[in-house]
Image (spheres, helix red, strand yellow):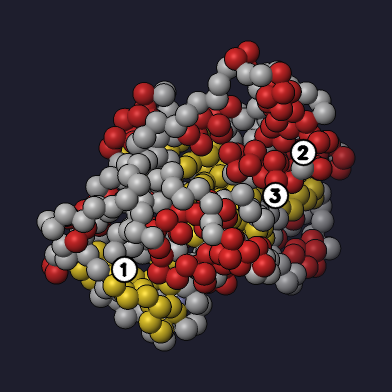
Amino acid sequence: MNRESVTIAPDAPWTRPWPEEGLERLGWCPVCGSGERELLHEALKDAVFFCAPGCWTMWRCASCYSGYLDPRPTVATIGQAYGNYYTHQSAGSRADSSSLSLLRRIRRALSNGYLNARYGTNYQPASRLGPGLAKMLPRQREKLDARFRWLPKPVAGQRVLDVGCGNGGFLLNAHDAGWQVMGVDPDPDAVATARQKGLEVWLGSMEAFAGEAGLFDAITFSHVIEHVHDPKSVLADTYRLLKPGGTLYLDTPNIDSRGSRIFGQHWRGIEAPRHLVLFSLNGLQQLLQQCGFSVIELQRRRSMDRGIFLSSFRIARGLSPFGNQPKKLPVGLALRTRLLCVSTSQLELITLLAHKKMTTKISIAMATYNGEKYLQEQLDSFVTQTCQPDELVVCDDGSTDATLEILEVFRQHVSFTVRIYRNEINFGHIKNFEKSLIILYR
Ligand SMILES: [Zn+2]
């Protein structure tokens, strides 16, 4: 859709009420569960795609400061809000380098040089000057990083899942970087488009992996989490599906942004009723921590702001945000957007990476031979540690005293795994300890 102005037909779907039986009432914040709230916006309509029926009320949580619709469409009826949604439009591909002007070819080579070094792609032509230059040009670097979602460079065989992958544009980039890629999306047309590109994409959402755990090294959500009814359960599922040390990437409109304050109910991030929740940074961080994530890294992503201001301005004038006019903000408004103090927590999008903790297995390797005099004391010392081991591997070198009996009694009385091996011949203490280490590592 690319209309400049919006003509309101008397029977247009978006002017009708949402069916009453398709509404659910919450009374509490879907981010933190608090019932304390204040009215934020009333009479919100679909001013973005002009396809969803209904008139909506947004509340602001008094505890975590996130915004949410209440009442809102039920899970069963939310599909009615997505008539003209754009996820299945094909993404533009990069032009062949040879068709570019000399200046653009140089820029392409510098960009490729940076992407190859940072993300593991093998784009050509590539300049070795790219990584150094990117450090000096943070705005340019940010645009390149956004295409790869700031993910770490993968090692062979690492897997990324993109939830709400649309036509698979990001998955193609991730594939270029060496990731094994997989996507899920609820839009059948988007899934068909992605599959035509050879991508492994499933229709639906996270439920495709119900009961699974530790499948992915990275899971990404771009403009997705604000659309889901139960963000807490989605992020808990994400945590479970990540491997230890895995990375979550997430971006979503920021209710504390400058645009939200300046444009109010016309802010592009509102997008009722498809956006059910608009997170505050505080609310989202708390939710991620509750789901187990640690080390949350915020990205300072400024390049989206201008486009969101302009879209919001068009919405405020009753125009489509995707139209071509006006191309600039009026001077006063442009100044306001620039004069407001801009910390990372006030940018139009919250963009972050969060990590699942590494799990460290504590194992003890031990070699024994006729040690009945000191063995019990040594074993007891393992039990009295504040952090118990996960396993104890013991190789006995053919003891003829009570060593094995002591070990067996110990094995039956501790909560961690004790594996006992007995050598048929005497190896000597060095080789015996080596054997216990080999068993421990295999
Ligand atoms: Zn809340």
Residue bearing the label numbered 2: 134
Query: Which is more foreground, mark 2 or mark 3?
Result: 2
Counting other residues with Cα less than 10 Å from the Cα at mark 3, is it few (<14), some (14-19), or many (20 or more)? many
Please tell me whether residue 278 is drawn above or below residue 321 in the rendered image: below
- Residue in the image at 20% along x and 68% along y: 23
Q: Is residue 434 above or below residue 374?
A: above
* Quadrant in the picture for the N terminus: top left
Residue lying at the far top of the rendered structure: 98
From the viewer's perspective, is residue 226 above or below residue 219?
A: below
Q: CA distance from mark 2 to mark 3?
A: 50 Å
- Front position among marks 2 and 1: 1
- Local secondary structure at mark 2: helix
Gap in angstroms between the C-alphas marked 1 and 3: 64 Å
Q: Is residue 82 visible to us here? A: yes
Query: Is the residue indicated by label 1 positioned so its CB lies within 8 Å of ligand 1?
Result: no
Report x, y in % for residue 381: 78, 68
What is the C-alpha distance between the residues marked 2 and 1?
42 Å
Residue at mark 2: C-beta within 8 A of ligand 1: no
